[in-house]
Image (spheres, coloured by chain):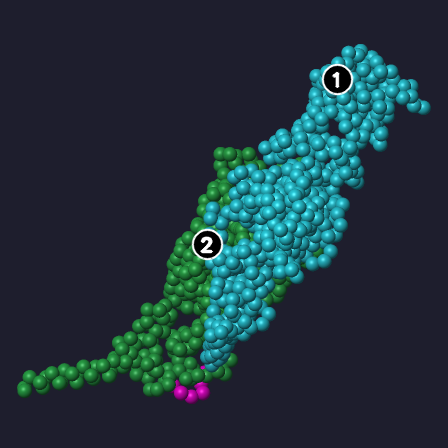
Chain colours: A cyan, B green
Amino acid sequence: MKKNKYLLLGCSLASLALLLGAAVEENFLKEWRRIQARGSNEEGAIPVQLRQVVNQQLGVADRCVSCHVAMGPGEQAVQGGEILVPHKAVVHDPAEYGCTVCHAGQGQATEKADAHGDVHFWPEPMLAKEMSYAGCGTCHSALGVPGQEGLQSATLAFERLDCYACHRVDGKGGTVRPDQGGMEGPDLSRTGLTAYDAGWHEKHVRKSAEAQAGAWKTAFRAVSEEDQALLAMYLATRVAAPQLVAAKAVFHSGGCLGCHKVSGVGGDDGPDLSRAGFKDPGQVSFEHVPGKGNMKNWMAEHFRAPASVVVGSQMPPAALSDNEIQQLTYYTLSLRRKELRDQYLPKDRIRAVKFSEREFATDGGTLYGAFCAGCHGQDGRGRRLAGLVSFPSITNPDFLAIAPEALLAQTVEHGRPGRRMPGWLKSDALRPEEVKAVVAHVRGLGGVTAEADSKPARWVAGDRNHGKRLFESTCTGCHGAEGKGGEGPALHNKVLLGAATDTYLVETVSRGRRGTAMAAFLEPSPVRPALTKSDIESVVAYLRSLEGGK
Amino acid sequence: MNTVEPKSKALDEFAGNLKSLPQRFRESAFRTGAPTTDRTRSTFVFGNVFLHLHAVRTHRWSLRWTTTMGLGIMSVSAFLIALVTGVMLMFYYKPYPEAAYQSIKDIHFVVPTGRLIRNLHRWSANIMVIAVILHMARAFYTAAYRRPREYNWLMGIGLLVVTLGLSFTGYLLPWDQLAYWAITIGANIAQSPREITDALGITEYFDPGGFQRLLLLGSDQVGAEALIRFYLLHVMILPLGLAALMAVHFWRIRKDGGMVRPVDADAQLARQGGETYPVFTEAPAKTYQLAAIVRGRTPQTGRGPENTVPSMPHLFYAELGVLMLTLLVCLALSLVSDAPLKELANPSVPENPAKAPWYFLGLQELVSFSAFMGGIGIPMIVLVGLGLIPYLDRETEGTGQWFGGPGGWPLVRLSMVVGLCAPTVIEAFAIRFGWLREWFPAIPQLIVTAINPATILTAIYALYSLWCIRRYGSVRAGALALFTCFLCGFLVLTIIGTYFRGPNWVFYWSPAEWPKH
């Protein structure tokens, strides 16, 4: 039975060896231990120990500082190569806030792949370095951000009015000049967060008048009301994250809110995007996504070709440049709002949640871009996309010429039941004054004002039966029997008939709508005789009879 | 001055006592001295509360590696390793959703040796399941269940069930996606009697399936209630139950006459000759039998009475050796492979495929054909069948021999072919052509429950075994055939469930072919 003895001896020795090996591995060979062993501060080598930032209010226990020691509390002086560098100066001290609040990743992990979230089952991988500011979205939401055009003209106004001469914004301007001047004004990079003196313009005018020479005399001139509004818009969006704001502007130009909600405002057709930045890479398909399988690439490809990335997606592909798609990705990744304890609630979020301030600017252009442009196009000419119903042009001059403001407003407010156009006057969508702004913007886009109409809304007194016969012989081909719709839009729609005046209906039939299949029926055509005014009125009278039904 | 004398004497005595303290302590602990003689070796065993479960002498047959392959001791060893590491894990584990997951993350990343301890716990648990199954196979193939060991065979089946229960309840505790959905599947298997009650339309009044599931989860879905239940079962109820059953199991081994051995074991040992080792070293304090002190080259020489050797140290070397071997294997596996920990459990994102722990994947495979048959029917048939074996096979031929009994190894070999081919062919057919539900969508569920690949496989195994009983004229032959088929079927189904089932339980040759969800 000697072999039992040898079994015991051999296994015991081998177990001991493995345990020793495990002990060495754990106590000496761990990556973070080796990194810390390279580090030193003015007092010499730093103790090698597990380091972490704990913030219970934020639910953070980040061991990232076990490797990135110099970013830990009170360790800025630690040196020792590439990983042991301090964090760049930021408003939120990483020693207090931890790392994962902004950068995501797995704070509890102590190994690189796990910590950076490069493991397939960690749902919140680290944000790419060039998109770090997407992390701001965990707590913040920039308010009053206009669309791309609005933001661009606001930025240009700031430049044109030479504000950079004295002010520094986002690291630009306010440089010291040869005449010893420069930096006369405060840094304006965070005016969206901290607010600023509302009476700045009067003060500027006064000071400029008093000044004899120097920047006050040369660099400032009274600013027009229009430009003041642009500057206000610009300053409202300075939150020390200019790229993220620019990205949000792209989002507010693509009509995304027409289908998606962000923070409870927007349409219902698409999924709510309030936490889209937390989309779990383990739960999506990368089959049709070129490049590395990360959410950045997934989202970019998804914007380019939604249906190929997400089977059955009804989202129209974005007509955007590569750069804009990157920006859209950037903003979407920033939609990662977390629940926060009161003491960490930032002002902007309180303003948004408690005081119902808008994340988008509320001028007509921005509202149209954020809510309408997805379907009706940036220029309002409508869109035709393969596999989707075509979206009508709303800047058609024939339409705008006869559509009174009330018709436009009612259409925006109540939508068109049965079609994709939703009603927007809702607690989770637009407010009455916002609808007005949108309508004014649409009118401006078309550049055609409505003809004056002195008649009451309902004045037609035609022969309904005659109208019915005419309708069946002339209109049903496109608009369907009893106006139920076919290739052309349904006409028995209650909301449409409620909003449309008789003048509008009569004029539409009479003049037709150029650019669409709707012909002008007052004119003869090779395939049918012209209708008379009274014929058309009879048809309208018939249409009115459909209103009572469904 | 007279009074000083006794004082100094007492001081001397004190000093002397202090000096002899280690020796006195040793003597008080080991009252009969070093185990260097047969007598002291015996007292070493029966004077020790932990060792006296062993006989003082062990038959040489029991110590041969081929007799037991150490599988029973390996099961106990794995249990001990799991027990020790499990208690250590309890210091850090918090049995509440979310907190549970975070605490496992902490154990994995920052608790000193935490990762190794957790890996050891996981691997020892898996090895325990494997060892228990193999141990049962050993007991079966050497016909060790026969009289007088029938009852201990039943205890063994109880231990198998408790072992699976322990492993299964531990599965939920990390509270990650893997755990959550595996337990959801497991709980649904518990609910499978509903298939019958639904088909009969009586679920509303009589719902044993729903009750079982509720009993297991304490709620209608896997949540905090289920976690605390599983935790309590895992750390308290089942280990205590296992310990109690183990005590009976070991006690019975002793009382049933130790390891089973063939009637001609002594003759076989004599034929082999070879290995001799000193039975006695220093002069024995007392001899028990004349033969024990004979020295020479006769067969009995050096073998002690009736071919036995003192348990101390021979048996203990073997037992400790297996313990250390088990530890070594667990350690090696723990160092190369981490226990899995996926993302936090999320009830709204089902894993697809959601798979039960591996030892239940064979059952899950059957459940995919019929929930009731896979979840309750066939497991019950198997357990009852296993329990009945010692009472139906009352033969004596081949006891204590590997594959002993009529038919022997050739029969087992044939049964392996049948046992492996039958499920493979049936699975291949069902995967290729579908089953009743695909052919006749409107067919009543009871028919599918009665006729499906699972029941057909069971029927084939049963008929084949009956044929073996007839052919060899022996119940043992039928048992050999059936048990071999059962093991092979378990193997094939588990492998299919583990490696060849993808999302929605569809067959795939490899996970690389899975649709990228």
Residue type, numbered disc 2:
Gln
**Residue B496 appears in the picture as rendered:** no
What span is in magenta? B294-299
* Secondary structure that dominates the magenta span: loop
Residue highlighted by disc 1: A454
- Give coordinates of residue A176: x percent, y percent: 63, 60
Is the same chain shared between marks 1 and 2?
yes
**Secondary structure type for disc 2:** loop
Residue B296 is a magenta residue:
yes
- Give coordinates of residue B297: x percent, y percent: 45, 87
Which mark is drawn over residue A56? Answer: 2
Q: Nearer the viewer, mark 1 or mark 2?
A: 1
In the depicted view, which residue is nearer to us: B348 or B385?
B348
Residue A306 is a magenta residue:
no
Q: CA distance from mark 1 to mark 2?
A: 68 Å
For the point 79% across and 40% down, the residue is A386
For the point 49% across and 74% down, the residue is A42
Vertically, is A76 above or below B293? above
Vertically, is B91 above or below A446? below
- Give coordinates of residue A483: x percent, y percent: 78, 22
In the depicted view, which residue is nearer to us: A253 or B232?
A253
Q: Is residue A155 left or right of residue B348?
A: right
Check whether the beta carbons of the residues at disc 1 and disc 2 lie within 8 A of each other.
no
Residue type, numbered disc 1:
Ser
For the point 51% across and 80% down, the residue is B272
**Secondary structure type for disc 1:** loop
Which mark is drawn over residue B506? Answer: none
In the rendered image, the quadrant that contains the C terminus of chain A is top right
